[in-house]
Image (cartoon, helix red, strand yellow):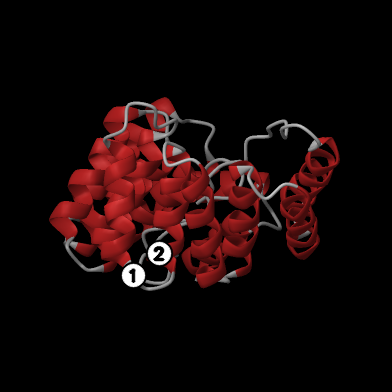
């Protein structure tokens, strides 16, 4: 499911296929030092390309910004996020490490580095970065860091630890949809469908407008044989997001209900 700008849809049915991690929110714009005004313009252009989905163009502009001012950690972070989105995980790791070499206290880059390491098949290394970021009081998104720690445990099939961290994510921000959905995914993996339904019902109370929560709850109801309850949630998602991945999944389940 989506959370923020770039979060992938997570559903109970697709828990095995769902990506363990996603690109973290945002790249903070910063003014380059000294002669870096041109570098800043290049960076901001790259940032706009990244936000609008022109990722390869973003890479080129971030590289130009770094060539003009190689000592700005924001520029290396931006390049790393572009590489991460392209699936070039080793390049992303290199860029994030360069950002941290310039500014070791740039906590958000530890989140990014953890994402790149975990996505490259190194969940334990990624988890170390996340744990460091989570313990830092300057971490801007502790709920996302906790979610990502849980995701590394989920990938390793350590469901009790995954659930513990997804619940920690909910405690840090009870309006973070992915924490509820990932908790439900984990409970389903543990064979606790009724508990998964209860978690998603609690999510619906505080996130009634979130389509990802509606889809996950509709699918959980479908799995539990509560077809009338499932239909109402799935029809809402299908009507609100007819061409998106969530809407397509909802429509598929609705067709199954009609058979």
Q: CA distance from mark 2 to mark 1?
A: 5 Å
Label 1: element kind: loop
Residue 14 seen by the camera: no
In the image, 152 versus 202, the foreground residue is 152
> Which quarter of the picture shows residue 67?
bottom right
**Secondary element at image label 2:** helix
Q: Nearer the viewer, residue 178 or 156?
A: 156
Q: Position of residue 254 (x, y in %)?
A: 53, 61
Of all residues, the one furthest to the left in this rendering is 160
Closer-to-camera residue (93/155): 93
Callouts 2 and 1 close, C-beta under 8 Å: yes
Q: Which mark is residue 117?
A: 2
Say whether residue 253 is left or right of residue 76. Answer: left
In this rendering, the answer to whether 63 lies above or below 137 is below
* Mark 1, residue position: 122
- State the residue at coordinates (31%, 65%): 123
Tell me how many marks there are. 2
Asked if residue 158 can be seen in this view, the reply is yes
């Amino acid at each position: 499911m989506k959370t923020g700008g770039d979060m992938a849809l997570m559903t109970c049915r697709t828990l095995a296929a769902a990506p363990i991690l996603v690109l973290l929110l945002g790249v903070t714009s910063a003014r380059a030092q000294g002669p870096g005004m041109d570098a800043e313009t290049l960076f901001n252009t790259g940032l706009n390309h990244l936000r609008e989905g022109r990722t390869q163009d973003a890479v080129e502009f971030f590289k130009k910004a770094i060539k003009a001012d190689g000592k700005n950690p924001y520029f290396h972070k931006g390049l790393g996020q572009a590489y991460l989105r392209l699936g070039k995980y080793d390049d992303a790791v290199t860029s994030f490490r360069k950002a941290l070499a310039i500014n070791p206290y740039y906590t958000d880059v530890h989140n990014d580095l953890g994402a790149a390491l975990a996505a490259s098949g190194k969940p334990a290394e990624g988890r170390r970065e996340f744990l460091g970021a989570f313990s830092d009081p300057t971490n801007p998104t502790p709920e996302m860091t906790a979610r990502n720690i849980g995701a590394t445990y989920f990938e390793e099939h350590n469901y009790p630890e995954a659930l513990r961290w997804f619940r920690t994510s909910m405690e840090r921000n009870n309006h973070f949809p992915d924490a509820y959905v990932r908790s439900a995914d984990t409970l389903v993996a543990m064979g606790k469908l009724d508990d998964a339904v209860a978690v998603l019902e609690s999510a619906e109370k505080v996130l009634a407008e979130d389509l990802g929560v509606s889809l996950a709850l509709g699918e959980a109801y479908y799995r539990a044989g509560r077809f009338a309850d499932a239909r109402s949630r799935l029809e809402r998602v299908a009507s609100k997001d007819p061409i998106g991945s969530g809407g397509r999944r909802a429509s598929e389940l609705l067709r199954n209900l009609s058979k």
